[in-house]
Image: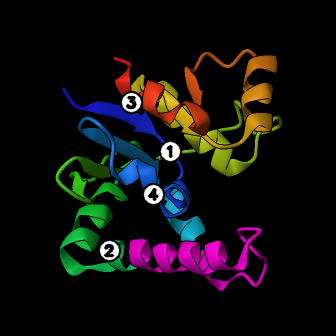
Amino acid sequence: MRRRLVIEAVMLAIYGEMLVPDRDVEYLVPYSTIQELYELRESKEPIMPESDDEIHVRTKINELINMTEEPFNRKKIERALSVPWAKSSPLPLNSKVTLTIIYAVENAEYGEQFDPIETDLILTSLHEKVPMLTDQPEFVDRLIEAEVPVQVYDMDDFEYAVEGD
């Protein structure tokens, strides 16, 4: 059975281990995080502290953008963007990993405590009843403090998150 997790698209560029899990994984990615890749690509602000890591992550961001712009994938994504909460057909990244883009629709329910990307992650996790994976401990702390009813894993627990059902 395929493990499903909600993530930000940029995590695929930063954490290579996400592309080589021990079992089949479907990453559910809110479309707003795909748009964020374009912003990161254009930004002059460093993404990573080390220059070699920065070059690698920016290369991976470009690869992800190029993958989403391939005509066949673009068509799948555009279909999902026509209706709120629609999902693209799975986009295979390799034999074990697929990416499904979700057109999450932000509402004001969590807008005061969380930024728009975080809100889309929360709402996608709630809507799909799927755990979230993040690399931001302060985000996890705010989820707990706000008593948001989502299951969340820290990136340090990636292997455990993939094992779970």
| Position of 84 relative to 154 (above/below) | below
The kind of secondary structure element at disc 3 is: helix
Q: Amino acid at mark 1?
A: Ile
Q: Is residue 13 found inside the magenta-colored segment of the image?
A: no
Q: On the image, numbered disc 1 is attached to which residue?
A: 7
Disc nearest the viewer among 3 and 1: 3
In depth, the one of 128 and 85 nearer the eye is: 128
Residue 141 quadrant: top right
Point out which mark residue 153 bears. Answer: none
Q: CA distance from mark 1 to mark 2?
A: 17 Å
Label 1 SS: loop
Q: Amino acid at mark 4?
A: Gly
Residue 51 at x, y percent in the picture: 71, 79
For label 2, the crowd category at 10 Å Cα-Cα, with few meaning under 14, some 14 to 19 and many 20 or more, is some
**Hey, what amino acid is under mark 2?**
Met
**Dot 3 corresponds to which residue?**
162
What SS does tag 2 mark? helix
Q: Which residues are magenta?
A: 38-65
Scheme of image coloration: rainbow
**Label 2 belongs to which residue?**
67
Is 52 included in the stretch rendered in magenta? yes
Look at the image and tell me whether residue 103 can be seen: no
Mark on residue 16? Answer: 4
